[in-house]
Structures are given as C-alpha cells and as structure tokens.
Amino acid sequence: MAEAKKRKKGFVVGTLILFASLSFLFFTNVPKAVLEICSPLFQNGSLEMQMMQLTLMEKGGLYDQVGERLKEKGFEHDILGGITEKDKILVKFVLKNQEASDKRQEEIMDIFHDYIEKNNLNTQTFDVKVSNDTSTNW
C-alpha cells in the first residue's frame, strides 16, 4: 500500500515537472530546435537531474551565462539539451553563422568548462558537443 502511494506521488511530481518545463518552453521565446530536443530527452534520468536541467535553463543560469559569452565572441548559436538515462546532461552548441571547426569547438568547450567551474558544477556530469547539426544526434 505504501509502495503504491510512493509511486503515485512520484508520478504526480514527475508529471508536474514535465508540464512546468514544457509550459516554460512554449510560453517563452525559445527556438524550435530546443523544443524538439528537450521534450523527448528531458524525461530521461532522475528527478534530481531534471530539476538541475531546469535550473541550468533559467535566466541567469549556466546556459544563459555561456550563451552571453558566446555572443560576445561572435558566435550565433542555439543551445540544445537533454538528459540520458544514466543521468548525464547532454549539451549541444549548434553554430549558425560559422563552421564548427576543431578550433571553434575547442574554444567553445573551454568557455563552457570555465563556466562549469565558476558555477561549482562537476564537468563529468555533462556530455558536450559543438556542431552545425540541429538533429538529436549526439
């Protein structure tokens, strides 16, 4: 009986988080590519990782900080994200105005890792990719 209540409570909390995150995405000015990639991949992973992903997406959060720095450096981009079943946060920087050369990939990865350290986060939590591809291919 208690196990059923825990499952029901977990289901309700998970549903509310999913609804809140999708509402946030639909009612803010978020690129379509972010909606496409976050929706299916956001449901993977633990509740803690889903909450962390929401925190990273907030205004002033990690993605916003990195995005501002990339704009300063002249990179027109989208940031796509998701969570794996093994609680790894997927982050993909999609360059719009430049080819994702090895040098640019390294520069963007360095910027991202600097901000991970500034925010006292673990670099092992993230799987980061830089490309020109907007697909959900990681």
Image (spheres, rainbow, N blue to C red):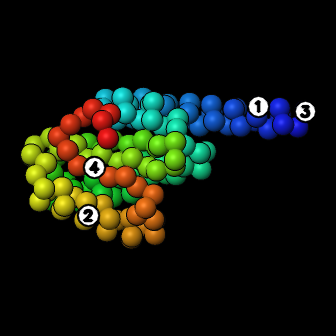
Q: Earlier in the sequence, mark 1 or mark 2?
A: 1
Q: Which residue is mark 4?
A: 129
Local SS, label 2 = helix
Q: CA distance from mark 2 to mark 4?
A: 13 Å
Residue 61 visible? no
In the rendering, which numbered label is found on residue 128? none
Q: Which residue is mark 3?
A: 1
Q: CA distance from mark 2 to mark 3?
A: 50 Å
Which is in the foreground here, disc 1 or disc 3?
A: 3
Q: Residue at x 26, y 56 (%)?
A: 68
Quadrant that contains the N terminus: top right
Label 2 sits on what residue type?
Answer: Ile
Local SS, label 1 = helix
Give the x, y percent position of residue 40.
45, 30
83 lies above or below 109: above
Which residue of the protein is positioned furthest toward the front in this rendering? 86
Q: Earlier in the sequence, mark 1 or mark 3?
A: 3
